Amino acid sequence: MRRNLIYPHRSVRSLPLNGARLTAAVLLSLVLTMAAYWYRAPLLARHNQISAALLRACDIPTEGSTQVDLFDPIGSAEVVTITVFRLPQQPVRVAILFVGAVLVLMGVYARVELARNFIVFLLVLLFLAAGVMVFSPSSEVTSVEFSQIWLRGEILVWLLLPWFSAGLLVLLQPTVWPGVIWAVLMQAYGFLWSAVRLAFCLGVLHFSGLLLMPLLWFTLGLLADVLYIVVFLSLSTRVAGLQAWGRRAYWQF
Amino acid sequence: MGKAGLLAILILFAKVIVGIAIVVLTLYAGRHYGFTLYRLSLRRPRDTNELVGFLTPRISVLVPMHNEEGVAADVLHALVECDYDHDQLEVLAINDRSTDRTGQIIDAFAAEYPIIKPIHRTSGAGGKGAALIDATKQANGEILLLFDADYFPGRAMLKMLVSPFCDPEIGAVMGRVIPHNSGSSLLSALLGLERAAGYQISQQARFNLGLTPQFGGTVGGVRATALKAVGGWNSDSLTEDTDLTFRLAASGWKIGYVNRAECYEEAPESWPVRKRQIVRWAMGHTECLHRLGGEVWSSRFMSRFEKLDAIFVLGCYWTAPILVMGWLASLVLLFSPQAHQVPIFAVALSLVGYQLFGSQATFFEMGAAALLDGKSRPADLVPLNLVNFFASTGAICEALFRYYSGRIFGSPGPGWHKTKRYRENGIHNGNGNGNGHGNGGRQLYIQGANGLYSCRLEERQQ
């Protein structure tokens, strides 16, 4: 019995930090952060163009662009403007959307045990948003305000991301270059994925107003950033593993 | 006070909550990053492998069992096959008020192997702690080793776990726990990764840094004199292992960790089972924090870093409600018009961003553990641990709510629940342990030193 289950396995004794990888991590962080900071204006403009193009591709009418303030060191950015659905216009639609969203979440709740706590949190957000729409209709958010909130978060993600990619990706690689490539890829992916997610959120905002906004902001905002960082960590670890085991493999028993 | 005043207070409160969440979670994240980078850099993880077999004192192996008919034969079989000198070894198989055939299996083994001493508990307090108290009274070993019934100790396991006791300062030793059923379900696979991070990274780093690795109550051992010196097992605690760890540490004993002493366990395969486990751990840990926190902090035997790390360990379950409160507070800030107008919003959001990034520390730890363990597939599962993370966060919040409401209103805790077993090997399948069916009972065959040994198992009385 025991013999079938205790498997001999190879393992890596250690992956000591060396000067090359530490230097690469620090330099890469500095370079990518500086690039994100110095080219923030063209990056934000391109981000807006991608979002607007995706909205137009989905036949969501845009009303041009508006300049919004982010915060002091960053300045301002142009964001696409769309009309946002409001409760007094079609309360029945809100009710249907609300019931539909609750049913979908309850369906997931019933089927996926492990996701239940997460679904409960999303349901709380949904009910809070519905409460705000019903009891305080003036609290509704425009697409410009939503984009402003979004970009305030995302620009910080782009500035912080290099430090995390250096820590997570570069230091876990046995050699320098794979880590650098993973970090650059993750930075580019973070930028593009943010524009796609924003376009999706604005589209939903156009059709459902505030109702799904907290839920979307929570799941597609910083949480989605966390998710792709972890995915990159996972992929790079797998590649690193293959490289490291090839060099230092030994049987533990 | 008008509406604006109330809103201002709410925003201020939200900022304070977010601030607390950021500080606490950043400290924990820093600790995880630190341990991971330190462990990655260790060319020679501290271990006592060179001493294996050098020290062979008389030892008692305690195996508490409560309704373990499905797994009892496997653990006893594995223990009698260990390469420890049988003259220096006794296995105290504790039948803790079982209502199934556990007692018969133990008796069958005891009849075949003189080193197995059955202890049948039919009354008294329930739970592992109470069973260990009874067994410890009958144990003759200098070192008491512990295994839960679902574990498979390898042949060299006992010598490995005993070797750190060469150091007279060592009061307890912990081995490494690895789920053998990682492939059975998504949850058990995720738990395998979580366990790898906890043992390969955190426990090893803490041992190397001279901090206090946690004695887990199984795949480990405690020096009998140390146990006696700190007052023995605490049967009132839901986590008697955590309780013992920090009573030993506060009294000046060191805890050892043996990464190579790998033992295989059954991880929960379904969420309700896992949830019960988390609830018990969270309540037990937090109870230890309240009861032992002061003792640990004022200990004259522990260094400042040891004390700080011990408080981090004891308070680790508090991070879940803090995280949730931080999320809710950040939502208040997001949807408050006043918060939008001031630059502090951006600061708050950036801090929330950092708070979310802070959770990367755990994933980094898992990735590093998978890398060191030489396993590529588990690394693919790292992102799915986000789901596990949310599920555990909710369960911990519920556990702490129950714990504190219990403290305030005096309601009883959850009690001790045995974690569900998924194997039925001793009886139903077996890899060497066949089964037969006769009239009025089943025949259990045990591979003994002198060939097959058999015993008749009576059908369980419902």
Image: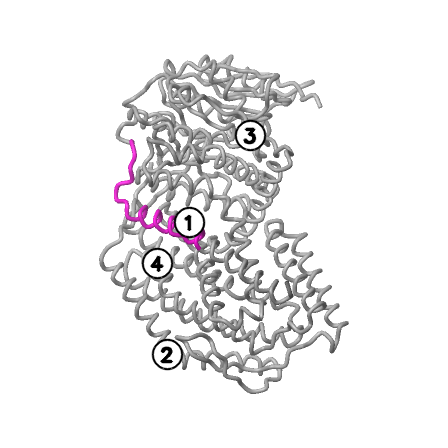
Residue denoted by label 2: A39
Q: Which of labels 2 and 3 is toward the front? A: 2
Q: Which badge, 1 or 3, is on the more N-terminal residue? A: 1
Residue A44's label in the rendered image is none
Question: Which element is circle 3 on?
Answer: loop
Question: Which element is circle 2 on?
Answer: loop
Viewer-nearest residue: B65 or B253: B253
Q: Do marks 2 and 4 share a chain?
A: yes
Give, as a single range, the part of the protein colored magenta: B23-48
Name the chain under label 4: A
- Mark 4 is surrounded, within 10 Å at the Cα level, by few (under 14), some (14 to 19) or many (20 or more) other residues, namely many
As for residue B40 lying within the magenta part, the answer is yes
Q: Main secondary structure of the magenta part?
A: helix
| In the displayed structure image, the side of residue B336 where residue B29 appears, left or right | left
- Mark 1 is surrounded, within 10 Å at the Cα level, by few (under 14), some (14 to 19) or many (20 or more) other residues, namely many
Residue denoted by label 4: A167
Q: Considering only vertical position in the picture, is A46 above or below B421?
A: below
Residue B291 in the image: x percent, y percent?
49, 32
Viewer-nearest residue: B291 or A110: B291
Which residue shows up at 50% across the image and 18% down it?
Answer: B452
Question: Which element is circle 4 on?
Answer: helix
Residue denoted by label 3: B425
Q: Which of labels 1 and 3 is toward the front? A: 1
Name the amino acid, label 3.
Asn
Marks 4 and 1, how far apart at CA: 16 Å
Marks 2/3 in contact by CB < 8 Å: the verdict is no
